[in-house]
Amino acid sequence: MELLTIGNINFDELLGEYRMIWNNRLLASSDHSSEETLKEAIKRELLDENSHPRIRKNKYEKYYLAINRITMATISNEAKVSLIRVHNGVMEELLKES
């Protein structure tokens, strides 16, 4: 079994899988690549920018909820691993920024 790295992820397909899991998310991607769109959507999710400020959760809670939602989704295991890896990368960037 080949290990997935960010270098061999098909972000067009992964963005489609992400849209299936988070079916109410608006993901405008007109002038951005699928990779940029996906990473920006994940960043907004982890920062809980889609919620009202008074009910926002911290990024650690949001990360846990996102990973749990991915693992419970009816998508391929390869897509789950890829989405988790992208979430990990975005979370690492957020931690560097704080």
Image (spheres, grey):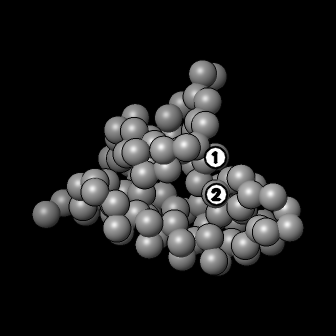
Indicate the quadrant where residue 92 lies.
bottom right
Helix, strand or loop for disc 1:
helix
Kind of residue at disc 1: Glu
Q: Percent from the top left, x then y, of residue 38?
A: 54, 44
Of residues 94 and 51, the one drawn nearer to the viewer in this rendering = 51
Q: Percent from the top left, x then y, of residue 89?
A: 54, 62
Name the quarter where the C terminus is drawn. Answer: bottom right
Give the Cα distance between marks 2 and 1: 9 Å
Residue that badge 2 annotates: 45
Indicate the quadrant where residue 62 lies.
bottom right
Of residues 8 and 17, the one drawn nearer to the viewer in this rendering = 17
- Residue at the spot 55% in from the left edge and 43% down from the top edge: 24
Helix, strand or loop for disc 2:
helix
Horizontal side of residue 96 vs 72, given as left or right:
right
Circle 2 packing at 10 Å, graded few (<14), some (14-19), many (20+), is some
- Residue at the spot 54% in from the left edge and 76% down from the top edge: 64
- In the rendered image of this protein, does residue 92 appear above or below residue 82? below
Q: Percent from the top left, x then y, of residue 67?
A: 46, 70
Q: Residue furthest left?
A: 1
Q: Residue furthest top?
A: 30
- Residue at the spot 18% in from the left edge and 60% down from the top edge: 2
Q: Which mark is residue 97?
A: none
- In the rendered image of this protein, does residue 27 appear above or below residue 98? above
- In the rendered image of this protein, does residue 93 appear above or below residue 64? above
Is residue 84 at least partly visible in the picture?
Answer: yes
Of residues 12 and 23, the one drawn nearer to the viewer in this rendering = 23
Kind of residue at disc 2: Glu
Q: Percent from the top left, x then y, of residue 97?
A: 78, 66
